[in-house]
Image (spheres, helix red, strand yellow):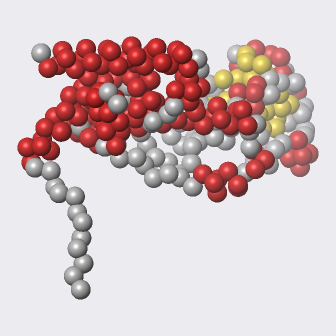
């Protein structure tokens, strides 16, 4: 009896290269952020902490995390657009 | 989910996380050291924060090898070398050394204690001198040949007292692991013979 093996198709070389370029661009933009903005983005998205957990880790209120995160994302968008220009 | 947030989460997926340590066994092994619940949670979150600071450059280094230097720089780690050791060195406890007495100059210690300190010929003058009750402690900083002592920022401590205290009595006053051995120096012996006393060093 033959057993079919499901395997995710390997990405095309050009797609993989584009994805790698996008990741590099994003890391570069993160690198240009201030430490306060990088920190909150790292906690929220890279470590996947909730806003309450971010607040406890940063010793601030959840509202502060929300506003700081919003400013950090805004700054990150500006950096990405500047890189594209 | 906004596109930028999705890209950030995807970036996290590219991070090669280190294996999770066996925390349960470690915690069970030391129940007495368990902190109160509030502190425990705070510590966990602090650990998460530290992990973020440590793992973020790891993410950059893994996904973007050529950006490694930049990532280290934005975390202020460009000139930091990370070394893995079996166990961290014991933290120095300044109060242990302070128990030996107050910091003074060698000359002042000798005047106050009433005898000339015998200096180890190979080491010369100590880095610090502490004066206790009629005893002088010579503190030498760690250096090649003098590895750090446990709990103190020193490679060698020589405590000298005037009088005829025998080694076995002195041992009763000391913590385990401290050696007691008699020694003499030309300088101290000459002076002590004039004054009819015997210098004792530990």
Judge from the rendering whether residue B53 lies leftward or rightward of residue B171; answer left or right.
left
Which one is in front, A10 or B43? A10
Q: Who's the residue at 45% across and 36% down the image?
A: A48
Q: Would you place residue A73 above or below residue B39 in this image? A: above
Judge from the rendering whether residue B19 lies leftward or rightward of residue B32; answer left or right.
left
Which one is in front, B94 or B104? B94
Query: Residue A81 location in percent, x, y?
Result: 19, 17
Q: Who's the residue at 90% across and 46% down the image?
A: B172
Looking at the rendered image, the quarter that the N terminus of chain B falls into is top left
Q: Residue furthest left?
A: A14
Q: Who's the residue at 60% across and 51% down the image?
A: B23
Q: Would you place residue B27 above or below residue B63 in this image? A: below
Residue B35 occupies quadrant: top right
Q: Who's the residue at 40% across and 46% down the image?
A: B17
Looking at the rendered image, the quarter that the C terminus of chain B falls into is top right
Q: Is residue B81 visible?
A: no
Q: Residue furthest bottom?
A: A1
Judge from the rendering whether residue B2 lies leftward or rightward of residue A18; answer left or right.
right
Query: Residue B118 location in percent, x, y?
Result: 72, 31
Q: Would you place residue B194 above or below residue B33 in this image? A: above
Residue B187 occupies quadrant: top right
Query: Residue B131 location in percent, x, y?
Result: 79, 22
Query: Residue B173 location in percent, x, y?
Result: 88, 41
Tally of numbered discs: 0
């Amino acid at each position: 009896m033959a057993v079919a093996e499901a395997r995710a198709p390997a990405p095309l070389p050009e797609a993989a290269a584009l994805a790698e370029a996008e990741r590099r661009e994003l890391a570069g933009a993160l690198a240009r952020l201030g430490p306060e903005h990088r920190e909150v983005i790292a906690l929220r998205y890279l470590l996947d902490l909730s806003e309450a957990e971010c607040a406890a880790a940063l010793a601030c209120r959840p509202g502060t995390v929300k506003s700081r995160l919003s400013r950090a994302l805004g700054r990150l968008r500006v950096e990405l657009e500047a890189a594209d220009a | 989910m906004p596109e930028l947030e999705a890209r950030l989460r995807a970036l996290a997926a590219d991070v090669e996380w280190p294996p999770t340590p066996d925390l349960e066994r470690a915690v069970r092994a030391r129940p007495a050291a368990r902190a109160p619940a509030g502190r425990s949670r705070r510590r966990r979150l602090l650990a998460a924060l530290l992990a973020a600071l440590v793992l973020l450059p790891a993410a950059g280094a893994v996904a973007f090898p050529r950006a490694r230097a930049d990532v280290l720089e934005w975390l202020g780690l460009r000139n930091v070398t990370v070394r893995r050791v079996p166990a961290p060195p014991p933290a120095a406890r300044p109060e242990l050394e302070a128990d030996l007495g107050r910091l003074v100059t060698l000359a002042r210690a000798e005047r106050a204690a009433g005898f000339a300190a015998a200096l180890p010929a190979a080491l010369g003058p100590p880095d610090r001198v502490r004066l206790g009750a009629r005893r002088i402690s010579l503190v030498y900083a760690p250096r090649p040949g003098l590895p750090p002592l446990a709990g103190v920022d020193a490679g060698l401590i020589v405590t000298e007292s005037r009088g005829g205290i025998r080694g076995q009595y002195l041992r009763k006053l000391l913590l385990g692991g401290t050696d007691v051995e008699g020694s003499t120096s030309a300088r101290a012996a000459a002076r002590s013979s004039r004054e009819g006393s015997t210098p004792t060093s530990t």
